[in-house]
Image (cartoon, rainbow, N blue to C red):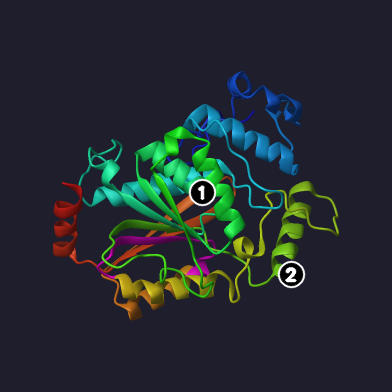
Amino acid sequence: MHPKVKSSLHPRNKHNERYNFKLLLGKSPELARFVILNDFEDESIDFFNPDAVKALNKALLKQYYGINDWSIPKNYLCPPIPGRADYIHHIADLLYAASSKESIRIPKYADKITCLDIGVGANCIYPILGNREYGWSFIGSDIDPIALKNANEIIKSNPVLHGKIELRLQKNEKNIFQGIIKRNEFIDLTICNPPFHTSATEAANASLKKLNNLTQKKYTKPNLNFGGQSNELWYEGGEEKFVQKMIEESRDFTLSVFWFSTLISKQANLDKAYVSLRMAGAREVKAIQMEQGNKISRILAWTFLDSEAQRAWIESRWS
């Protein structure tokens, strides 16, 4: 028997319970052709089928977030929504803890929050979740014009997102914040799901290893069921170098951003990031552990604002 509640997810995550396919099919009947019975006689889908994963995402977004039209181009990253929602909820706790102990409730100033998503992707998932859950406004940046075009189509086709998400093209793929954050612009929070791998070959091999472990079969060709373009999956130097570059650039925006944050997949990379943050002069650093099934990841957050500057930010921006 499976537990009804996925206890490792954040308490406010709408996906703490097992997927209710009867509920999902009520609004998304097109999902029906992908629903199967697993080995435990529970309704599920084949998570190695990219079309099934995309159909499930569309149903979840429609049922729980009021997004009626969502799609991504072929071979672009199709994210697991429960895990993406966990990042949003955990980082909301951190952001709201600065001004209130009532982190479970959405503060009255929520619509004044501006969040920058580095690498928004074609799926636009973090801005969707952050806006629909907390009312935040978003800036989404990406180096891929095709991804931004698709994200813009999602925004245009869903009236609830109109005026809530602005997309910006990063013209220099070597930069992260430079060229995106404008002069005299203030950002309350930055988020990022960085590319984990060091090369396309490493990304393919990692996918193949995961596939073999999960299915207990011997595959020789990777099946990237969640898709992903090169810039979504790998970066020269991998996650370690990407985060290091992000920390270095964040020093140029010490007074423009309240909290910087990023996901970190490996503990070793977290330890190296701590060293970089000490050298950069970060005033406060937080690491938040997230668990999704057997997967453990971390949110690393940092700010250059001391306690007095944080109070001034809250009073001037949120009051």
For the residue pair 128 and 220, the one nearer the viewer reads as 128
Residue topped by disc 2? 201
Which residue is at a point 18% across and 58% down the rendered structure image?
Answer: 313
Determine the secondary structure under disc 2.
helix
Quadrant assignment for the N terminus:
top right
Determine the secondary structure under disc 1.
strand
Residue flagged by tag 2: what amino acid is it? Thr
How crowded pointer 2 is (Cα within 10 Å; few <14, some 14-19, many 20+) is rated as few
The segment highlighted magenta reads 254-269
Q: Nearer the viewer, mark 2 or mark 1?
A: 2
Disc on the earlier residue, 2 or 1: 2
Residue sitting farthest toward the bottom: 279
Q: Position of residue 26 (x, y in %)?
A: 60, 18
For residue 295, say whether it is visible.
Answer: no
For residue 80, say whether it is visible.
Answer: yes
Q: Position of residue 30 (x, y in %)?
A: 69, 26
Residue topped by disc 1? 291
